[in-house]
Image (cartoon, grey):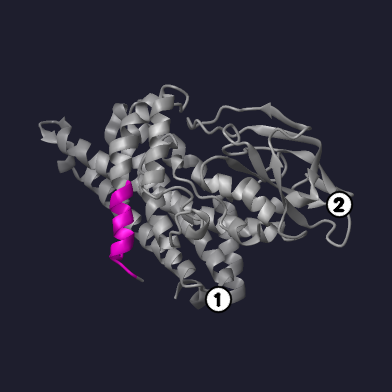
Amino acid sequence: MTYPLSKGARAWQEKVRKFVDEELIPWEVEAEMNGGLLPKKVRARHHRLVRELGLGAISMPRELGGGGLTMLEQTVVSEQVGRVTNALGWCVRHPPRFLADVATPHQMETWVRPVIEGRRHECYAITEAGAGSDVGAIATTAARDGDHYVINGEKWHVTGGGAADHFTLQAKLTEGAHAGAHALFFVDLDSPGVKLVRTPAYTHTYAVQHPIFAFENVRVPAANLIGTEGDGMEYTREWFRHERLMIAARCCGAAGRLIDEATAFAKERRAYGHPIADYQAIQFMLADSLTELWAARLMTYRVAEAIDAGEDVKVLHGQCSMAKLYASEMANRVADRAVQIFGGRGYMRENVAERFYRELRVDRIWEGTSEIQRLIIARGLYKRGQRALVE
């Protein structure tokens, strides 16, 4: 593996770190105290700078107007984005890459290119009240009716749904050669029958929100089918691999920020006549945090390079799960230690450790819980053996 990073990846790292430090981190407390929202002029500035820095739609090919970044470069960018709380870094976008390969010309001009250019905003609607990590259990249906599909169901935790104008929606086909299989559709938010059920409050304070939507006899043109019938689950697995790796990267960024902040505080805070950094209790917590961060970062970078090298996708599926599992649980441990080091200050919402303590918890849940990642890893071990996965 290439470590230290290549010059190209290092350049992206430095560019995004500067943007995060100078433009995003100073607004964290403002966002926290205002439901995740920032003044419109500030948000507009962030989005403009993202475009100018080449960070718009970084997962998409350059020929379509995207950033065209390698997976390692995307990982490095996401790691730096993970250093900021309140999802302020989500102005850097990763639309599903598979759309560039399977979208029809009509879909490209109606949804994909406008998303790449920042003129439209999408959200992925998969999860349901009875189907989370077990995506196969979704109950939302798509029934063919002439040149349309009729969609019925309800989707939960639709991340970004509060700011989106269309869904990438997953449903089960009810008839035909692919009955019972999954399909993806573009569904415009203003389609008749699409209803906002409610927008729950969550532990973290993100402006993007995660609403619940109902789909009641929503007629979707057959031209909105993404790819072919029955391939929906394969597209989602590709999306999961990407998102799990990006979660791992963001967790590394969060842990790195927490270590820096806790170290600086420990050097200044005095107890019994000495900086608390002098005490082994603090030193051990920081040493464990730094060691675990390095391990998670090496794992995450290695998987990104393996994806760029085109290695076996079935092996990569397990390795993305390993990266997400280890990095997300590592970051939670680091956040807990950081709160402890800050003491009472670490329990104040204005403190970065308090915010990350809340925010990082979801990384052990979304895009597949830690328990699901362990199942994926164990199955990969049974099928392919240890050497395929870790040597």
Tell me if residue 82 is in the magenta stretch: no
Residue 385, disc: 1
Rendered location of residue 374, percent (x, y): 56, 58
Secondary-structure class at tag 2 = loop
Counting other residues with Cα less than 10 Å from the Cα at mark 2, is it few (<14), some (14-19), or many (20 or more)? Answer: some
Please tell me whether the stretch drawn in magenta is mainly helix, strand or loop: helix
Secondary-structure class at tag 1 = loop
| Identity of the residue drawn at 41% across and 66% down | 302
Type of the residue with mark 2:
Thr
Tell me if residue 4 is in the magenta stretch: yes
| Identity of the residue drawn at 39% across and 36% down | 46
Rendered location of residue 180, percent (x, y): 82, 56
Instruction: For the N terminus, give its image quadrant.
Output: bottom left
> Which residue is tagged 2?
174
Q: Quadrant of residue 353?
A: top left
**What segment is highlighted magenta in the picture?**
2-16
Rendered location of residue 256, percent (x, y): 31, 48
Rendered location of residue 217, percent (x, y): 83, 37
Who is closer to the viewer here, 360 or 215?
215
Q: CA distance from mark 2 to mark 1?
A: 37 Å
Residue 336 is at least partly visible in this image: yes
Instruction: For the C terminus, give its image quadrant.
Output: bottom left
Type of the residue with mark 1:
Gly
Q: Is residue 247 left or right of residue 282?
A: right
| Identity of the residue drawn at 88% across and 58% down | 176
Q: Is residue 225 left or right of residue 295?
A: right
Q: How many marks?
A: 2
Who is closer to the viewer here, 334 or 12?
12
| Identity of the residue drawn at 73% across and 42% down | 130
Who is closer to the viewer here, 280 or 264?
264
Query: Could you tell which of marks 2 and 1 lies nearer the N-terminus?
Result: 2
Q: Quadrant of residue 103?
A: bottom right
